[in-house]
Image: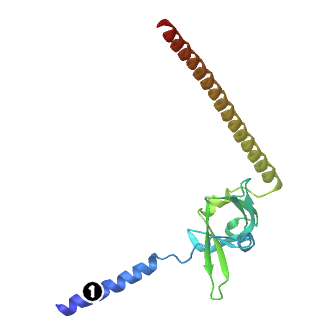
Amino acid sequence: MKKSTLTLAIAALAGGLTLGAQAQPAYEPQGLYSAEDILDADVYLTSDPDERVGEVEDILFDEAMQVTALVIESGSVLGLGGRDFIVESGQFTLITHYDDDGETEHRVMLEASAEAIEGYPVYSDDWWDRARERSREAWLQTQDGAESAWQTTQEGAERAWDTTRENAQRAWEAARDAVGADD
C-alpha cells in the first residue's frame, strides 16, 4: 500500500513537472524588435506550422509608427503563384527563438487557412495608392472630428461663461435691491 502510494506520488510529481514544462512558451518576448531582423523572416500557417508560406518582404507602418501590415513574398507554395500579398496586423503573430549562439530567429505565424490567404490583397502600386488615400481620408476625418469637438467644447464653454456672468449679475442686483430695501 505504501509502495503504491509512493509510486503514485512520484508519478504525479513527474507528470506535474512535465505539464509545467509544457506550459512554458518555447519563446520569450524580446521587448524591442529590429525591422532588419524581421525582414526575410519565414512565414507559416498556425494550422500547419511545418508548411512555409513565404517570407516577410516589407513592414508597413501608419502615421503613429505602429505596424499595420506585413508584405509577404509567397514564392510558389500553396498555389499562391509567387505573389506578394498583404497581411494586416491582428492576422499574424511574431515568434522569437534564440539559437545556441544567442542569435535571434523570428517566425511569423499567420492566423489563416491557405484558402483565406488566396483572398488577401496583392501588394502592388495600385494597392499602395488606394491604401494611402484611405489612410489620408481617415486622418482628415479624424482631424475634422477633433476640430469639431474642439469647436463644440469652446462654444459650450462660452455659453456657460455667459450664463454664469448673467446669473452673477442678477444675484448682485438682487443683493443690492435687498440691501437698498432695508433702508
- Dot 1 falls on a residue whose secondary structure is helix
Please indicate whether residue 69 sits to the left or right of residue 27 in the image: right
Which residue is at the far left? 1
Q: Nearer the viewer, residue 163 or 108?
A: 163
Q: The N terminus appears in which quarter of the rendering?
A: bottom left
Can you identify the residue that label 1 sits on? Answer: 9
> Which x, y percent locates residue 128?
79, 53
Q: Could you say which quadrant of the image residue 16 lies in?
A: bottom left
> Which x, y percent locates residue 27?
56, 76
Q: Amino acid at mark 1?
A: Ala
Q: Nearer the viewer, residue 147 or 8?
A: 147
Q: Residues within 10 Å of mark 1 (few under 14, many from 20)?
A: few
Which residue is at the far right? 125
Residue 39 visible in image = yes
Q: Nearer the viewer, residue 98 or 75?
A: 98
Q: Looking at the image, which residue is at 67% across and 30% down?
A: 154
Q: Is residue 99 above or below residue 79?
A: below
Q: Looking at the image, which residue is at 54% across and 78% down?
A: 26
Q: Looking at the image, which residue is at 72% across and 40% down?
A: 143
